[in-house]
Image (tube, rainbow, N blue to C red):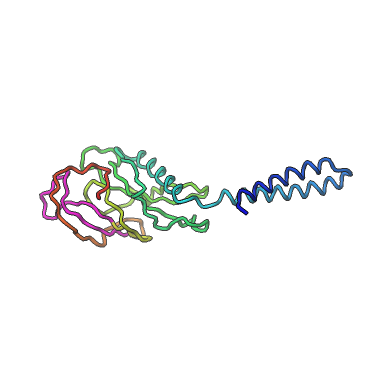
């Protein structure tokens, strides 16, 4: 039987039994009957609580994470582009109720923290999202930009997230040539980098692989993912 049907059954039985109880005579029978009704009501409450504690579906989790990070980005930066579901990494996914306290997600976003102004102030940022006691997804400021350091691809575009573990992210994107000569607008080296979080939550590059050099003359739009 599904949870919703179970809840409906308890509710109907409790309401029906209470009506019968109130019509009972003598009073001691009415009292015993009401006690039985109360037990059913308690069971109804337990069933409702269990149903409310179900793990959200993945699309619902994604929506809540995007909403939490978008609100955080809008509060501390400008301009902040739209947070993309493709930039979410499930470091410790929320699959069952037992995972709620440990579930953790890393989300990449782009913006000028503090609204300093100038093209050089826009950079890729990171937000760490966990699940609160009430089941709501929330950004942890102490583990997110700007409180922690995030190294990766220096160009202003958000890199493409291609993989992750519980403490690493694998990113593809366009970066500036080590030899120099690239304008701020136009990085020319396609790279893949792996970044790892340390015990303090800072992310540093542990592997960097140039994949190709392209003739890029088109400015990268801040907030766009490199493909």
Residue at 34 percent across and 49 percent down: it is: 86
Residue at 25 percent across and 42 percent down: it is: 222
Residue at 75 percent across and 47 percent down: it is: 37
Using the image as rendered, state which of residue 8 and residue 41 is in the foreground. 8
Is-magenta flag for residue 215? no
Is-magenta flag for residue 173? yes
Task: Residue 203: name its quadrant.
Answer: bottom left
Q: How many marks?
A: 0
Q: Is residue 203 above or below residue 24?
A: below
Using the image as rendered, state which of residue 60 and residue 168 is in the foreground. 60
Using the image as rendered, state which of residue 57 and residue 221 is in the foreground. 57
Image spot of residue 80 (x, y percent):
31, 40
Residue at 28 percent across and 55 percent down: it is: 171
Q: Is residue 219 above or below residue 204?
A: above
Task: Residue 200: name its quadrant.
Answer: bottom left
Q: Which residues are magenta?
A: 171-197
Image spot of residue 189 (x, y percent):
17, 53
- Give the left or right position of residue 158, taking residue 11 as reference: left
Residue at the front extreme, as displayed: 1
Image spot of residue 32 (x, y percent):
82, 49
Q: Is residue 225 above or below residue 75?
A: below
Image spot of residue 50 (x, y percent):
60, 52
- Give the left or right position of residue 23, taking residue 112 as reference: right
Task: Residue 110: name its quadrant.
Answer: top left
Name the quarter where the N terminus is drawn: bottom right
- Give the left or right position of residue 169, taking residue 59 as reference: left
- Give the left or right position of residue 48, taking residue 102 as reference: right
């Amino acid at each position: 039987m599904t949870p919703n049907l179970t809840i409906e059954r308890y509710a109907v039985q409790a309401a029906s039994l209470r009506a019968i109880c109130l019509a009972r005579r003598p009073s001691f029978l009415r009292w015993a009957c009401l006690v039985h009704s109360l037990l059913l009501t308690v069971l109804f409450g337990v069933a409702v609580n269990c149903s409310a504690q179900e793990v959200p579906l993945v699309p619902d989790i994604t929506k809540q994470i995007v909403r939490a990070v978008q609100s955080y980005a809008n509060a501390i930066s400008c301009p902040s582009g739209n947070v993309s579901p493709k930039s979410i990494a499930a470091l410790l996914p929320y699959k069952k109720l037992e995972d709620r306290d440990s579930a953790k997600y890393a989300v990449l976003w782009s913006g000028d923290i503090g609204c300093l102004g100038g093209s050089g102030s826009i950079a890729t940022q990171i937000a760490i999202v966990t699940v609160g006691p009430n089941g709501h997804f929330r950004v942890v400021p102490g583990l997110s930009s700007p409180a922690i350091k995030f190294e990766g691809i220096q160009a202003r575009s958000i890199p493409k997230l291609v993989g992750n573990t519980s403490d690493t992210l694998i990113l593809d994107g366009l970066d500036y040539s080590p030899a120099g000569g690239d304008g701020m607008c136009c990085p020319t080296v396609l790279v893949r980098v792996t970044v790892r979080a340390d015990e303090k939550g800072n992310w540093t590059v542990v592997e960097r692989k140039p994949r190709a050099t392209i003739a890029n003359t088109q400015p990268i739009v801040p907030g766009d993912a490199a493909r």
